[in-house]
Image (cartoon, rainbow, N blue to C red):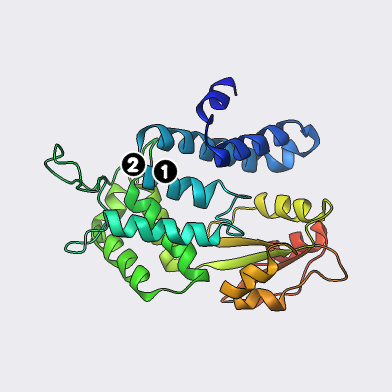
Amino acid sequence: MDDLSTAVDGDAHLKAHLARVQAMLHEPRLLDRRGRDLAEALAMLAAGTILRAHAPAAVADAFIGTRLSGPGRQTYGQGLDWADTLQQRMDERFWDAESGGWFSTTGADPSVLVRLKEDYDGAEPSAGALASLNILMLSNLLPDDGRMARVERALGRFGERLGEVARVVPLVAAAASTWTAGVGQVVVSSTGEGDEAAALHSAIASHYLPFIVAVPVTDTSREELAARLPFIASLPPRDGAATAYVCRNFVCQAPASSVEALEAVLLAR
């Protein structure tokens, strides 16, 4: 943890994510249920620090902004506009309009003679995999045919060989799986006070939900989010209590205001 504390210095989002990890470690009663959540949070934090230190700034910003700026599971809340802007900048600077896919460099540095598209997803995820996953989640909430066409072209570059090389491009394979399965939504609507919303978020994080985008809504963010995501307006907290709505194609199941009710809905999916 000391190494991570040093690595996150100077980045507010990385610091906030580290604080969430440390809070998990200080709640031993929850570790059994949240073990997967803790492992994922540590992996995302490590990836974020590596990208901040070694990747192009736009790639690092996109990953940190969309993966580490709130609760896990591809969460978009008050950072939605920022995530949208970061992806737009990434497309402008790195998209290959001729052959599809995202370059690893902008082409602005004359000392870089060849612009490469790095596909390998190692300790540092590839720019193309991150962009594809970001767009799949963003475009679920903010439909954009142009962006989805880019993802289709980027994934199409691999063709049938994706199955043969999946071990070295796991995030690309994850993007292809998300493209095929489609994305659902989980909205946690609350007043922003009390621990009820945190308990619901914890319950969501304890499940393996790779094709879900989570949207936290509080009284302070509701109006702003509803302007971009009109369906939010019809999903209020019930009787003042934090409420979770599990949806598919924006058609939601019965609202859940307790962890037990939410667990039942998630297990029935």
Q: Disc 2, disc 1: CB below 8 Å?
A: yes
Would residue 189 be found to the left or right of residue 269 on screen? right
Viewer-side residue, 197 vs 43: 197
Q: Residue at x 57, y 62 (%)?
A: 212
Would residue 104 be found to the left or right of residue 29 on screen? left
Instruction: Say above or below: 122 vs 217.
Output: above
Q: Which mark is residue 56?
A: 2
Instruction: Say above or below: 75 vs 186.
Output: above
Percent x, y for residue 168?
Answer: 32, 42
Residue 133 visible to the viewer: no
CA distance separating discs 2 and 1: 6 Å
Amino acid type, label 2: Pro
Instruction: Give the class, few, some or many, for how many residues have Cα within 10 Å of label 1's Cα (few <14, many ≥20).
Output: many
Q: Residue at x 72, y 35 (%)?
A: 23
Percent x, y for residue 186?
Answer: 64, 65
In the image, farthest residue toward the right = 239
Quarter where residue 105 is shown = top left
Q: What is the quadrant of the N terminus in the image? A: top right
Quarter where residue 153 is shown = bottom left
Viewer-side residue, 166 vs 247: 247
Residue 30 visible to the viewer: yes
Q: Residue at x 18, y 61 (%)?
A: 99
Percent x, y for residue 203?
Answer: 72, 53
Amino acid type, label 1: Ala
Would residue 208 be found to the left or right of residue 218 on screen? left
Q: Residue at x 85, y 64 (%)?
A: 241
Instruction: Give the class, few, some or many, for how many residues have Cα within 10 Å of label 2's Cα (few <14, many ≥20).
Output: some
Would residue 191 be found to the left or right of residue 168 on screen? right
Q: What is the quadrant of the C terminus in the image? A: bottom right
> Dot 1: what SS?
helix
Exactly how many numbered labels are in the figure? 2
Residue labelled with disc 1: 60
